[in-house]
Image (tube, grey):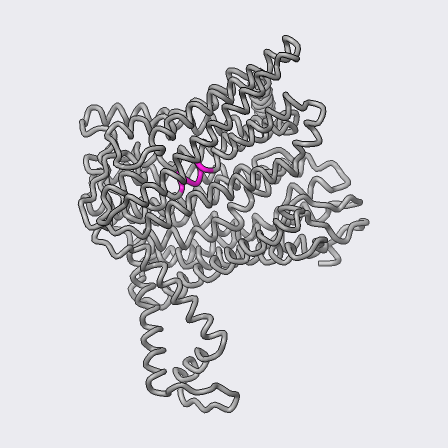
């Protein structure tokens, strides 16, 4: 590759990583090492399970094998380098290595996106044209995989051909943990505006277009389920739910990263963690938890391995393995490998994974739950479908509009307040997407079911995003306190390093909060009944159905959710009280502006926390009107947040007008060119 490199002064780059804090680096080293090992092992386990199981002859599992294979290699491109860098204070990478990593990650990322389209087409044919499924898909599988590889090769080649000729004169510090396009364009000693547009078109616009097409295809698939039986609908919804979850987890962060203008932001690193590290880890969990056939095949494979090892131990006995050990068959060689340290480590990993599967199965008789929803009246359900579909589209559209507006306005993104506001809007869009789509689809059916694994997944996701949002609201209150009470020190206190740390704390705190909830819930036995008087999976309705005493667990929920909400809500009210008292020394214009900003924040805090406190600050049982209260913080608050911040904030409104005017100018120019 040396002959391709342009003559410049830079031969290596310095990666700043996720953080500069040595203590935090040690913690991140352990976390990401565990994530990487889990990701690689779980994805390779799916590959081996499907490859060694003769029952998995359907094209769906053929594509799932390739998806897991790509995820295992995709995470191996970026994560090992990041993990090793966490051990060193100075993290460098040569120009040639940077371009190589950039090419491979875009090649594998492009392959995964194309493969997700292929899997969506496979589900469309299987559900909408079941009688012609094998005839259509049998000869297409290999061709579609080849198209995926060729398309990704073309995508990565286009990116690298433009980048490889850029001159780099210095500086060489990249505020990222991996090699990516926009951080590199920022360091080039030439005008990269047009190249940035090419990147946005080749990556961002393509992701947005493909994401829209996939959503439309799944809507068509779900609409066709009306003519299917109850069992067929359940199975189809379970499979499509897994695919749709993977699509959202991978494409939404990609759209957020590559649809931005040609500048980099500190939040890009945290968003990149999702599609580069967390999504490859979640994929095997999603497909295993929601797919009974894969779970059963994995168990059979592990039990076969365990039984084989036990038989060999009985036949051969306990002996010490040395270099001169004599084995006569391939089976005995494999058993001999099992007595080495690496073999035992492998067997221990397999046993731990098998144990986790048994916990998820939960040794219960209930495999699905029946959700009663908001109403049993068919006429009311039609109204619910129309109202909440409009509300959901408005929520996602409004929050993403705020994210795009702030991301495309350097003047707004330069302020920590708008950085947190963009993060809050992104969380609201995700939080609403966890609950609203399932409720909207359920309103079309008389019987509303959700699998045990699907219920646990929804429970984890809703508490994860809600926990992150609670901490982000706290960070926004602290930001306003510093801005109003210590204006001279605002820039030095609320620097990008602190903003990044606060966001990291928010995501970590939300994850820990959700993990604590889900670990206790996974242990519960459910023997029946399985009817939940709610439109979503939540803690108290589940505790009522458990076949054991849940009084202590109810107190844990009160402490982990209710008490924390009360404490944070009280602290936020006190902080805003201090801020309002300090306004007496400000001018009339300063008081008006501060009151407008704080008023927006307080309104959001009250709308979110008061219903949460009402639901979680008391021990079980659940009440029938809890689902009406839950509508406030799950549906209405994410919808009202963009309205509150937009109508009460002139800067956001002006920025939106500029974005709209910019779009109209571009459209007019294109129309004039065509004419």
How many dots with numbers? 0
The residue shown at (47%, 41%) is 510
Q: Quadrant of the C terminus?
A: top right
Viewed as shown, does residue 103 lie left or right of 566?
A: right
Q: Image quadrant of residue 292? A: bottom left
Q: Position of residue 155 (x, y in %)?
A: 56, 48
Q: Is residue 338 visible?
A: yes
Q: Which residue is the extreme one toward the top?
A: 588
Q: Determine the residue positioned at 57% across, 55% down.
A: 79
> Along the line of sight, which residue is nearer the eye, 281 or 382?
281
Q: Quick check: 352 left or right of 495?
A: left
Residue 574 magenta-drawn? no
| Above or below, comparing residue 111 to residue 583 in the picture | below
Region of the chain picked out in magenta, as a range: 461-467
Would residue 206 be seen by someone viewing this image from the given angle?
Answer: no
Q: x%, y% of residue 103? A: 61, 52
Between residue 334 and residue 105, name the one nearer to us.
Answer: 334
Where is residue 44 shown, x and y percent of the image?
44, 63
User: Is 363 or 122 nearer to us in this picture?
Assistant: 363
Residue 328 in picture, x, y percent from top left = 41, 90
Dominant secondary structure, magenta: helix
Q: Is residue 207 left or right of residue 407?
A: left
Task: Tell me the quarter of the picture where residue 222 sits.
Answer: top left
Question: Is 656 located above or below residue 77 in the figure?
Answer: above
Quadrant showing the N terminus: bottom right
């Amino acid at each position: 590759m040396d002959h391709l490199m342009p003559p410049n002064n830079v031969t290596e780059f310095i990666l700043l990583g996720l953080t500069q804090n040595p203590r935090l680096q040690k913690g991140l080293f352990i976390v990401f090492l565990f994530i990487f090992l889990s990701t690689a092992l779980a994805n390779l386990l799916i590959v081996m399970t499907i490859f060694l199981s003769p029952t998995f002859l359907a094209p769906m599992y053929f594509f799932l094998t390739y998806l897991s294979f790509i995820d295992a290699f995709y995470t191996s491109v970026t994560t090992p380098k990041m993990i090793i860098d966490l051990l060193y204070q100075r993290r460098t990478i040569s120009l040639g290595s940077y371009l190589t990593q950039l090419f491979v990650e875009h090649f594998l990322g492009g392959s995964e996106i194309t493969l997700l389209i292929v899997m969506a087409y496979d589900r469309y044919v299987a559900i909408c044209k079941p009688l012609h499924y094998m005839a259509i898909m049998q000869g297409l599988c290999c061709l579609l995989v080849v198209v995926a590889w060729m398309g990704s090769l073309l995508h990565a080649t286009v990116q690298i051909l433009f980048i490889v000729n850029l001159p780099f004169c210095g500086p060489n510090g990249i505020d990222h943990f991996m090699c990516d396009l926009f951080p590199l364009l920022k360091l080039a000693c030439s005008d990269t505006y047009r190249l940035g547009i090419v990147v946005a078109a080749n990556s961002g616009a393509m992701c947005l277009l493909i994401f829209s097409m996939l959503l439309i295809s799944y809507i068509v698939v779900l609409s066709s389920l009306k003519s299917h039986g109850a069992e067929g609908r359940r199975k189809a919804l379970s499979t499509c739910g897994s695919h749709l979850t993977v699509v959202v987890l991978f494409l939404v962060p990609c759209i957020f990263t590559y649809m931005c203008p040609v500048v980099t932001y500190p939040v890009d690193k945290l968003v990149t963690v999702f599609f580069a590290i967390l999504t490859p880890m979640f994929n095997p969990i999603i497909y295993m938890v929601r797919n009974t056939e894969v779970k059963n095949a994995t168990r059979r494979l592990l039990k076969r391995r365990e039984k084989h090892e036990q038989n060999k131990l009985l036949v051969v006995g306990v002996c010490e393995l040395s270099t001169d050990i004599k084995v006569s068959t391939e089976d005995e060689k494999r058993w001999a490998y099992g007595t080495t340290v690496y073999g035992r480590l492998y067997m221990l990993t397999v046993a731990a994974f098998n144990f986790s599967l048994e916990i998820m199965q939960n040794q219960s008789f209930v495999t699905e739950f029946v959700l009663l929803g908001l109403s049993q009246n068919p006429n009311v359900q039609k109204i619910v479908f129309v109202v909440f579909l409009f509300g959901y589209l408005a929520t996602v559209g409004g929050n993403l509009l705020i994210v795009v507006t702030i991301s495309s306005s350097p003047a707004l993104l330069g302020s920590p307040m708008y950085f947190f506001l963009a993060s809050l809007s992104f969380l609201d869009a995700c939080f609403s997407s966890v609950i609203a789509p399932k409720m909207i689809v359920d309103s079309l059916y008389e019987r509303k079911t959700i699998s045990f694994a699907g219920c646990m997944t929804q429970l984890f996701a809703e508490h994860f995003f809600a926990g992150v949002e609670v901490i982000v609201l706290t960070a926004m209150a602290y930001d306003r306190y510093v801005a109003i009470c210590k204006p001279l020190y605002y820039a030095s206190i609320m620097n990008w390093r602190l903003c990044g740390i606060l966001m990291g704390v928010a995501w970590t705190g939300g994850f820990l909060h959700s993990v604590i909830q889900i670990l206790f819930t996974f242990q519960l036995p459910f023997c029946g009944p399985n009817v939940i008087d709610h439109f979503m999976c939540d803690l108290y309705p589940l505790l009522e159905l458990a076949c054991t005493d849940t009084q202590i667990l109810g107190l844990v929920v009160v402490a982990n959710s209710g008490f924390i909400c009360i404490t944070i809500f009280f602290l936020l009210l006190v902080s805003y009280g201090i801020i309002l008292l300090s306004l007496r020394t400000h001018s009339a214009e300063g008081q008006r502006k501060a009151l407008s900003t704080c008023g927006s924040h307080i309104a959001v805090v009250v709308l979110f926390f008061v219903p949460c406190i009402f639901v979680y600050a008391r021990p079980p049982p659940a009440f029938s009107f809890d689902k009406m209260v839950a509508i406030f913080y799950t549906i209405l608050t994410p919808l009202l947040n963009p309205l509150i911040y937009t109508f009460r904030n002139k800067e956001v409104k002006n920025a939106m007008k500029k974005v709209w005017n910019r779009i109209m100018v571009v459209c007019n120019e294109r129309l004039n060119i065509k004419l």
